[in-house]
Image (cartoon, rainbow, N blue to C red):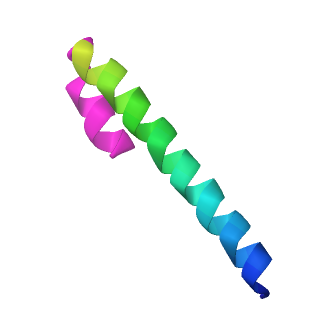
Amino acid sequence: MNDESRKQIVEFRIENARNTLKEVLILTQNELWNTAINRL
């Protein structure tokens, strides 16, 4: 695996993590605790 491929994978995973955190904020604001915990 070259450096560019590794960089793309890392960026993809970081973006997915950020999206998950956004989802969890919405879930907790609506008191959907079990779903929020599962997403984390």
- Mostly what secondary structure, the magenta segment? helix
Q: Nearer the viewer, residue 3 or 9?
A: 3
Q: Is residue 8 above or below residue 37?
A: below
Instruction: Name the quadrant containing residue 32.
Output: top left
- Where does the image place residue 37, in percent across and percent down from the top left? 26, 40
- Where does the image place residue 8, in percent across and percent down from the top left? 72, 65
Q: In this rendering, would 13 be left or right of 27? A: right
Q: Give the magenta part as a residue range.
A: 30-40
Q: Is residue 23 above or below residue 29?
A: below
Q: Is residue 36 above or below residue 6?
A: above
Residue for point 55% across, 47% down? 16
- Where does the image place residue 26, in percent across and percent down from the top left? 35, 19
Residue for point 20% across, 16% down? 31
Q: In this rendering, would 39 be left or right of 11? A: left
Q: Nearer the viewer, residue 31 or 21?
A: 21
Q: In this rendering, would 40 be left or right of 15? A: left
Instruction: Name the quadrant containing residue 23.
Output: top left
Q: Is residue 32 magenta?
A: yes
